[in-house]
Image (cartoon, rainbow, N blue to C red):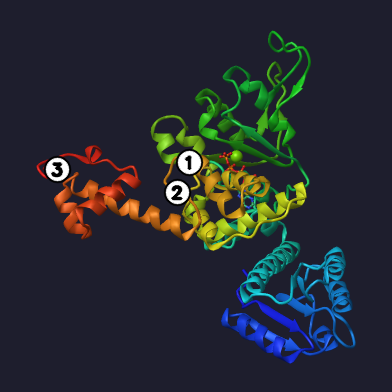
């Protein structure tokens, strides 16, 4: 989210040191500002600072420790790296205890400083990103807070909710498992005139057929064997509110007829009673799949479908909503980090790519679990995601985020595809990939590829 370059403020009374450090950092594309005095640096800092403060400890006027305390008073999460004189360990310890991000002992190699600044800068970037995300959530309306996402599709769906919510129209939701159908149903309820009534969800796929009718309509005591006391059904419970018929196609067809009648007559009778009860409810239904096909195969009665489908909202799978993936992942990872009191590891470029290329068959529900496991994992941050995603699906994933393993994976794919294309014809593969035979043999061995698995057609060239 934050894209501008990381700043580094360097505070040192020694000019040669300021120049040297500024040059190293500038070469690494940091925006460097150097200060000879601590008070000048302090005057230039705020809680918006996107960067790292590197300061010498012993300086005339305000010293490095005092500067650090005053900076941390502005924002306790600004990383301060202190530079200590050789052997000045007590001071370094005291700085660390008081909240320094790290210390570096003079003299030091440029690499040490660059590596420390890089880590500190990433941490700061994440802190600022989380703050932006939190602010965004605080400012957002109910729908935006519950149905997160910046993709065009989600924006469009939010618009539809705003338009349809206030009407009493029955809405039919279509989408794969875990895409957020129930979230959308609740949003529709929240912006409807019936929001003070209950939102009652019934998962039609989870109720045994024999219990379905009494679950929906309720029953009087003695209505059937085992009906010892009166029971209020879901229709009545949702009176004045919204009834969400989840997975409507799993409802027994005989019952679909009865539901249709309720919708037409706007009244129900409990089992074992002849007294009609008027009900005023809003109905939202959902299906995981194509409703028209369900009508064709007879699982969903067409007359009921057209009654329920006054308006239709289709929620596309997560893999088609690229920009939502990272946002939702960061959101759920942040929540998990807060809940479990864990550090939130920085998402490197490789991890972002792994998230974007994962197929997410379980959609947002799966992503939420992955984000949680990512935060709780004890593996190094770069390995966590690929490890978790690997276990999510048998789909081919980049084996790790490192360049070497991505290159190896790419090489393996090229050779494998060539093997497939030429059905194991080594001569053709050698020509296509322009490789000496020994190299190809070696690489196939390394990648565990066997020519035998691709044979077909021409087998002459062994
Ligand atoms: N756009 C979103 N913003 C925030 N959370 C979301 C979003 N979409 C889905 N979720 C979360 O993902 C999980 C699955 O969502 P939900 O239960 O609404 O999916 P569903 O389509 O009803 O799935 P199923 O078909 O399996 O019942 C929930 O925890 C929900 O809070
Ligand atoms: Mg659901």
Q: CB under 8 Å between callouts 2 and 1? A: yes
> What is the distance, in whole Å, between disc 1 and disc 3 at their CAs?
35 Å
At numbered mark 1, what does the secondary structure look like: helix, strand or loop? loop
The answer to the question of whether label 2 and label 3 lie on touching residues, with beta carbons closer than 8 A, is: no
Give whichever of discs 2 and 3 has the lower sequence position.
Answer: 2
Name above or below for residue 304 compared with residue 45. above
Q: Please tell me which of labels 1 and 3 falls first in the chain.
A: 1
Give the left or right position of residue 86, taking residue 357 as reference. Answer: right
Quadrant assignment, res 245: top right
Q: Nearer the viewer, mark 2 or mark 1?
A: 2
| Figure check: 290 above or below 355 | above
Q: Quadrant of residue 283?
A: top right
The residue carrying mark 2 is: 397
Where residue 237 sits: x, y (%)? 74, 33
**Near-viewer residue (462 or 151):** 462
Ligand 1 image-quadrant field: top right
Q: Residue 276 in the image: x percent, y percent? A: 70, 26
Q: Position of residue 209 (x, y in %)?
A: 57, 20
Count of picture labels:
3
Query: Would residue 80 be visible to someone looking at this image?
Result: yes
According to the image, label 1 marks what residue? 393
Residue pictured at 64% horizontal, 58% vertical: 162
Left or right of residue 365: residue 64: right
In the displayed structure, would residue 341 be above or below residue 117? above
Please state which of residues 167 and 144 is positioned toward the viewer in this rendering: 144
Q: Which residue is mark 3?
A: 462
Quadrant that contains the C terminus: top left
Q: Nearer the viewer, residue 368 or 10?
A: 10
């Amino acid at each position: 989210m934050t894209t501008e370059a990381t700043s580094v403020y360097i505070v040192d009374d020694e000019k040669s040191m300021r120049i040297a450090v500024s040059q190293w950092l500038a070469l690494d594309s940091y925006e460097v500002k150097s200060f000879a005095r601590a008070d000048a640096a302090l005057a230039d800092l705020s809680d918006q600072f996107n960067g790292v403060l590197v300061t010498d400890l012993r300086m005339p006027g305000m010293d490095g420790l005092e500067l650090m305390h005053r900076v941390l008073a502005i924002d306790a999460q600004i990383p301060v790296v202190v530079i200590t004189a050789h052997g000045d360990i007590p001071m370094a310890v005291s700085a660390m205890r008081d909240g320094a991000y790290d210390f570096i002992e003079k003299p030091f190699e440029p690499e040490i400083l660059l590596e420390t600044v890089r880590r500190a800068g990433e941490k700061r970037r994440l802190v600022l990103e989380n703050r932006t995300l939190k602010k965004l959530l605080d400012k957002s309306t109910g729908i935006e807070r519950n149905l997160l996402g910046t993709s065009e599709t989600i924006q469009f769906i939010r618009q539809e909710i705003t338009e349809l919510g206030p009407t009493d129209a029955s809405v039919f939701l279509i989408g794969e498992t875990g895409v957020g159908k129930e979230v959308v149903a609740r949003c529709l309820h929240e912006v409807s005139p019936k929001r003070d009534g209950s939102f009652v969800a019934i998962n039609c796929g989870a109720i045994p057929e024999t219990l379905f009718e009494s679950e929906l309509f309720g029953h009087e005591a003695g209505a059937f064997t085992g009906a010892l006391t009166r029971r209020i059904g879901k229709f009545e419970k949702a009176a004045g509110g919204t009834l969400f018929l989840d997975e409507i196609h799993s409802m027994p067809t005989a019952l679909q007829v009865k539901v249709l009648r309720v919708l037409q007559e706007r009244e129900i009778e409990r089992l074992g009673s002849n007294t009609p009860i008027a009900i005023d409810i809003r109905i939202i239904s959902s299906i995981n799949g194509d409703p028209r096909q369900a009508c064709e195969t007879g699982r969903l009665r067409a007359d009921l479908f057209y009654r329920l489908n006054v308006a239709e909202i289709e929620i596309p799978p997560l893999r088609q909503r690229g920009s939502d993936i990272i946002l939702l992942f960061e959101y759920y990872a942040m929540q998990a980090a807060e809940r479990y009191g864990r550090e939130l590891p920085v998402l490197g470029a490789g991890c972002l790519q792994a998230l974007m290329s994962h197929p997410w068959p379980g959609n947002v529900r799966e992503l939420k679990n992955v984000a949680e496991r990512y935060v709780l994992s004890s593996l190094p941050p770069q390995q966590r995601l690929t490890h978790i995603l690997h276990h999510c699906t048998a789909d081919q994933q980049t084996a790790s985020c490192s360049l070497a393993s991505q290159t190896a994976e790419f090489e393996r794919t090229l050779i494998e595809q060539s093997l497939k294309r030429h059905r194991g014809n080594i001569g053709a593969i050698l020509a296509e990939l322009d490789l000496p035979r020994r190299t190809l043999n070696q690489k196939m061995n390394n990648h565990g590829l066997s020519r035998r698995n691709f044979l077909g057609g021409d087998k002459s060239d062994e």
